[in-house]
Image (spheres, rainbow, N blue to C red):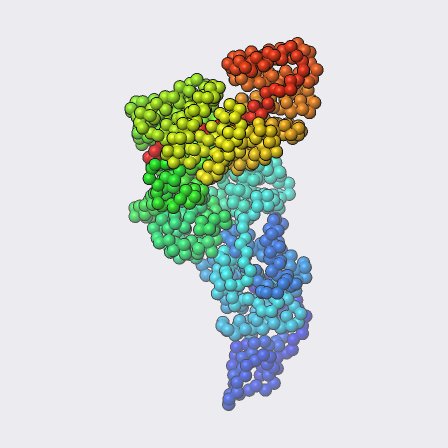
Amino acid sequence: MGGKNSAKRKKNGKTPKQGQGRAGTAVRNDNRGAHYERSQVVTNGSMTATTYVQQYAPVPTALDALPALPQEFTGRTDDLAFILGVLDPDRPPGGPAVAVLSGWGGVGKTTLAYAAGHAAQQRDWFTGVLLVDLRGYDPHPAQAEDALEALLRSLGVRPEHLPPPGAGREALYRSQLNVRQEAGERLLVVADNASALAQVQPLLPPGHHGMLVTSRHGLAGLGRMRTVNRLQPEDAVALLQAALKKNDPDDIRVEEDPGAAERVVLACGCLPLALQITAALLAQDPGQPLSERAEALSQAEGVLDGLSDGDRSLRSMFDQSLDRLSLQEQDLFRLLSLNPGPDIATPAAAVLAGQPHAATERILGRLAAGHLIERNPAARGRWQMHDLLRAYANEQAETVKARGRDPRRRYKQARTRLINHYTEHADAADTHFRPPGGAVSTRFPDREQALAWFDAERENLIATAHTTPHAGLHLGFTLGHYLQWRRRLQDHVVVRSLALDACRTLNNNGNEANAWNNLGNTLQELRRFDEALHAHETARTLHQQTGDTHGQATAWNNLGNTFLDLRRYDEALHAHETARTLHQQTGDTHGQATAWNNLGGALRHLRRYDDALHAHETALTLFQQTGDTHGQATARNNLGLTLQKLRRYDDAHHAHETALTLYQQTDDTHGQATARNNLGNTLQELRRYDDAHHAHETALTLYQQTDDTHGQATAWNSLGNTLQELRRYDDAHHAHETALTLYQQTDDTHGQAMAWNNLGTAYRGLGRFEEAVGAGRRAVAMLVVAEDWFRAGEAWGELAMTLTAAGADPVQVRDAWNESAAAYTRAGADEEAAASRAHTDSTKIPEEHPPVGDFSPSEESSEGAGTGTGA
């Protein structure tokens, strides 16, 4: 097929002589005056000659077949570089100059091939281009002999001189190209829209000629393969803008609302065809805002209706691809729309299809070869489908279900099989994360493999939890340990809420209290303490109503943790003592360990350090008895915090190092971050500042990995304290400012107060006394409001030293020391109060003062006992 701007070729042929045969004809008993080139001649009484190249009178050739590029063509830099690398005549030897571009319909393969052809011609790599449309996805695709005929005509062969379909036509095609190579020409053959190898193989050019093939299937064995993907969002916006301006240069809708433009292109899947259709529809309605078009395209139902302009339709293109599939392939394609998540593993797809694993994998491979699904590039054996194709698959599934009761029943059964697959595997994986002593499923050999399965299926599992109340109830319980482990707190609160809703919907009173308890734990992690308090109080009441002593113990324990976060320490102490007593009544050793551990935290906050030490040591012993390595890590970590308060820093260092090792053994990244940060605080007290600096930097990295903003704030604050000890006040200032910002993001007023205090001491180190005084006053004001009198005493002391260093009025300095002593007295810290009073008669900076390290909040890992049982 030639283009309309076919180049005229110079006449250099000869008039055929008498007796010269036409291609593919038989000439008998007369070969006088014939001219044969590369002919096979057999003579035995009569002669048969098959002529491959003849010297007929020249006819026009069509070697300038590439259409002009649309002005909206954009992006594709990497794709063009790849193709040009294949077509480059100076490329390294080792293969033909053939590139196969594959991708799903509408992704822009043809335009990319044209762009590559133009770019190659601009480099003078080719003297001409042959173009043939193989119509591979039409109801009647072009056959190879038809394509050869079109190409031979473009090369100047008259119709009456064409050999009949078969080897002769293919041989003539190669011969024509060989002759042109000998004449110093190099042609590029573009075979567009192929669907099968058989269409293309006879068209492969010999010698140094080049070829580009486009297909919705990956046609292996022809040349270098390249998958053409969707445009990048910025390139898609540029295409939309250029297409609109092509219709109206004054159309500025993209410039006026770039956010809506981005939503439009994302709804179009960054697919060039969808973008061009959308641009045409927008051009027909110049008053339509892009936000309105984006809203229309974002509707899950009918999205494909919005991607048709009358002449072009994305649905029609998908129909063509679907029609090329076998019945089994079509069936699985439709069934895949039932998967609630973004991708699917081969075993899950086999369950969905109700077919053996190997057979399903083969069909998935063929669907991927046709670009109706994609292999997940990040995980072997997982498959994904673009949103637009998913919408199409869902339409097709609905069409099949509308045929009658049997198809509807079949799809319902397939969906039920898939949900059961996910819930059963989730329950099996969860057994590796529950407290020791329970049965552990053999479906996963160890926790590592269970964790890997959870990681791979997380999005599918959360989506499945939304499908039915029973799925929400089951997964709302079984996903809890995993999501807590990975610190996926937003996902965690979603599934916990779904479990609670499911209990109410299903009138499952037995699990409603557990659901409230679990939701409260997650809300506590999200620092939504008032809501957490309500949840735990509700759980406690429900357990009391049913007489569930173990459930009451769990609720009291978690209620105590929430009281700790609310700084209501006396109430926390009472709650944990109650929990301990109830766990003792039920003989739950592990529950007792948890209660003792948390009780130690409450005692430490109440400055009852010896009692706290005993509580944590008791907890450690009980965790060892139950074989709970992670519980031992938690107890060791909290034991280290209490030893710090007792100024037993070597023992504290050992405790935090041991906790770190145990967290590493259990692969708890967040626990490692906590232990590292606390280890850094201890090293600071031991005056090992370089080691402390390294510990806090490592903690910060680990908190970032687990996406714990509050933990990052704590690590930044601790890091700043160490930098002050190293006299790196500029770096310390940056660290404390960062901590302050993060504490503000997490709405932690108490953390902000500590950051302000430490920021003030950094300012003091920099000699910026006015700012130091301002920061110190903000710190004391916030701590007084929080009624944290011990910290307020420390902050008043720091402010007094800042005022002294700034040369302030001695009266102000004395007042600050008096405020410090008064705050310590209210906290019951008589020794510290006496020290502050001793400074009231002096305006000198004391050589020893409460270290700024005290204002690095310690991370306290206190586990909530029990998260409910599976539904």
Q: Nearer the viewer, residue 269 or 642?
A: 642
Residue 239 in the image: x percent, y percent? 59, 46
739 over 2 or under it: above or below: above
Residue displayed at 62% across by 67% down: 208
Residue 785 seen anywhere in this rendered image of the structure: no
Residue displayed at 49% across by 31% down: 655
Q: Quarter holding the C terminus?
A: top left
Q: Is residue 154 left or right of residue 45?
A: right
26 over 711 or under it: above or below: below
Residue 724 in the image: x percent, y percent? 64, 27
Residue 769 in the image: x percent, y percent? 68, 20
Residue displayed at 56% across by 78% down: 51
Q: Nearer the viewer, residue 543 or 257?
A: 543
Q: Quarter holding the N terminus?
A: bottom right
Q: Is residue 298 left or right of residue 158?
A: left
Residue 726 seen anywhere in this rendered image of the structure: yes
